[in-house]
Amino acid sequence: MTAATELLAKHRMSIGGQARDSASGEVIEIRDKFDGHLIGTVPAGTIADAQDALDAAVAGAETWSATPAFRRAAILKTAAAQIRADRAQLSAMLSAENGKTIADARLEIDTTARIFDGFAEESLRLFGQTIPLDIQDGLQSDLMLTVREPLGVMVGIVPFNFPAELYAHKVGAALAAGNAMIVKPPEDDPIVTVMLTEILHRAGVPGAALQLVTGYGHVVGAHLAGSPDIAAVTFTGSTAVGAVIAAAAGRNVVRVFLELSGNDAFIVCDDADLDTAVDHAVAGRTYANGQVCVATKRIMVVQSRYQEFVDRLRERVAALRVGDQRGETTDVGPLISVEAARTVERQIHEAVEQGARVLVGGTRRGALIDPTLLEIDTRVGIATDEEIFGPVFSVLAVDNLDEAIELANASQFGLNAAVFTNDVTQAIRAGRRIKAGIVSVNGGNTYRPDVAAFGGYKKSGLGREGIAYTLDEFTQIKSIVLRGVLAD
């Protein structure tokens, strides 16, 4: 199937191994984020559809967990190879339905394949322990063995900003560990997840072990997350929605893994290489059109370098090319929706009312936000807790590194942070004192190696995602004790 043909398809969800329409017959129209033309439709799933998936998942979990680890890994690697083979179609769909540039879409599909490979390989090293109990008096003849077993039925709620990559992080980990997974994809750009699910099924994942229910979060997502029939729910999205999901799951004592909001600090010290800092600032705020939890959001520059940094950044921001995401030279495409762009526009206006000054941009055209450079101070909400999900650079002057660290930690979030300095003492001090999951020295905030223990402090989430770490979180430890086996 060509990319052009794929862009016109009517897509279905997958429940119990069957391609299905919604029980209500209703659909969600998926439109190109630049020109609004109809790409295709997906079912608007109902509570009944979600419950059917929950019912089918029980048998799926039993079948898949009984599949040997080497076979599960081989299936995931087959899927990864097919994702690479289908790179053009997947990238075209992702760019069209999400709005990210075609270059960013290709990068995401490459990352998606690599993550599936990574989980496949790491699952073969999911070891237990042998524990002699002679460390405790009276138990010296006992031997304890530990094994890691799947949790069971899991729900994965995937966000709109990286629907393919974060599908891989959740689905790849769940399947590699032997769990059954029910995916609730984003309603704005779900088609690439439908395509990925089909690839995994063709590779050999049983239909009941991997299901996908399209629809709205307050219907499908709420029912799945609040079900007593699941073992865990993994969610990436806003802190506000994450709190609702955690409350719903908590009523059933269901495990929750949350990757949530961030308002990352980007600190430029007096000895920083400004060329490097500006390069990373631009890349870290334009990637995925600025709709990234780990991004260049709060730029703090020591006063002695402030004006030079701002002048360089202003020149770069003004030169960014905005438009059709399919263009090979486009730097910034449309946001996920006109509504999202209006929200960013409102946040810019509110910042100005609070004292910010617009140096570049500040305008909206449909779903497009012209890259915007704001000069702010600590009175402006975006200096601490107001996260902007769009291509908006906020820069403020600080007296020294200590003030920047204090301001970085004043936020309720703590996902990633970046510090630019050539002084190793300053780098270590910042790394130790900043309350964030990752502190990147002489590199930007948009940094997530597949193997990193990705996740945040404070209200940026619960748990960690990363090749080895997620497999630990998506399994449970069982201890088997051989009583008296070591007796003389």
Image (cartoon, helix red, strand yellow):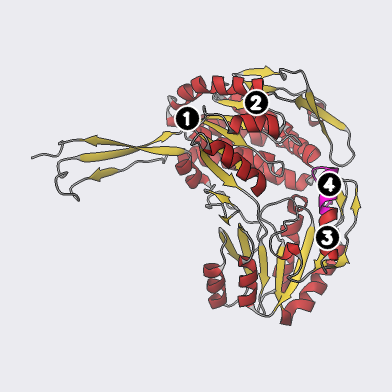
Q: Which residues are magenta?
A: 328-344
* Disc marking residue 285: none
Kindly identify the amino acid type of the residue bearing the numbered disc 4.
Pro
| Distance CA(mark 4)–CA(mark 1) | 39 Å
Closer to the eye: label 4 or 2: 4
Kindly identify the amino acid type of the residue bearing the numbered disc 1.
Gly
As for residue 331 lying within the magenta part, the answer is: yes
Q: Residue at x 48, y 39 (%)?
A: 474
| Distance CA(mark 4)–CA(mark 2) | 28 Å
Q: Residue furthest front?
A: 251
Which residue is label 2 attached to?
A: 198
Q: Residue at x 26, y 44 (%)?
A: 131
Which residue is label 1 attached to?
A: 152
- Note whether 130 is above or below 429 in the view shown: above
- Horizontal placement of 137 versus 213: left or right? left
- Note whether 1 is above or below 448 in the view shown: above
As for residue 350 lying within the magenta part, the answer is: no
